[in-house]
Amino acid sequence: MKRLLACALAALSTSAIAAPNPVTVPSKLDAKWQAKTRAMLEQAIEIPTVMKRGNMLKMTELVANELKAAGIPAEDIKIL
């Protein structure tokens, strides 16, 4: 049993080491889209969405506005 566990742990650690690091893998997105994506994610991260702070609506509006700007019809976007 110990040998089986050791082999499983070795296999898992080997696959984790072999996986490419997403930070060092070049993005396939155009530089303009990379900058736009980064800016949107920075805005999203800066919104404190901890419970009872009242900022969830602000976050949903940010995402909804981005979807609308991307061409998604407003009637297809539902905020629950």
Image (cartoon, rainbow, N blue to C red):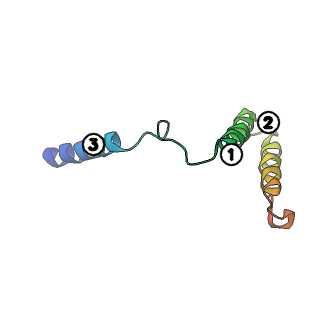
Q: Quadrant of residue 3?
A: top left
Q: Is residue 16 above or below residue 73?
A: above
Residue topped by disc 2: 53
When the figure is inspected, residue 20 is found, relative to residue 68, above or below; the finding is: above
Report the quarter where the C terminus lies.
bottom right
Which callout, 1 or 3, points at the residue further toward the start of the chain?
A: 3
Given residues 53 and 44, the one toward you in this image is 44
Residue 39 lies, in percent from the top left, at 72, 37
Q: Is residue 33 left or right of residue 61?
A: left
Alpha-carbon distance for marks 1 and 3? Answer: 34 Å
Nearer the N terminus, badge 1 or badge 2? Answer: 1
Q: Amino acid at mark 2?
A: Arg
Badge 2 marks a residue whose secondary structure is loop
Disc 1 and disc 2 in contact, CB within 8 angstroms: no
Between circles 2 and 3, the one closer to the viewer is: 3
Counting residues from the N terminus, which is met first, the one under dot 2 or under dot 3? Answer: 3
- Mark 3: amino acid: Thr
How far is disc 2 from disc 3 in space, using C-alphas?
Answer: 42 Å
The residue sitting at 51% across, 41% down in the picture is: 26
Q: Nearer the viewer, mark 1 or mark 2?
A: 1
Given contact means CB atoms under 8 Å apart, are the residues at marks 1 and 3 in contact? no
The residue that disc 1 covers is 33
Provide the secondary structure element on which disc 3 rests. helix
Question: Which residue type carries mark 1?
Answer: Trp
The residue indicated by pointer 3 is: 14
- Disc 2 residue crowd, few under 14, some 14–19, many 20+, Cα 10 Å: few
**In the image, what residue occupies the spot 50% across and 36% down?**
23
Instruction: Tell me if 34 is positioned left or right of 62 in this view.
Output: left
Residue 69 numbered tag: none
> Mark 1 to mark 2: distance in Å?
31 Å
The image quadrant of residue 32 is: top right
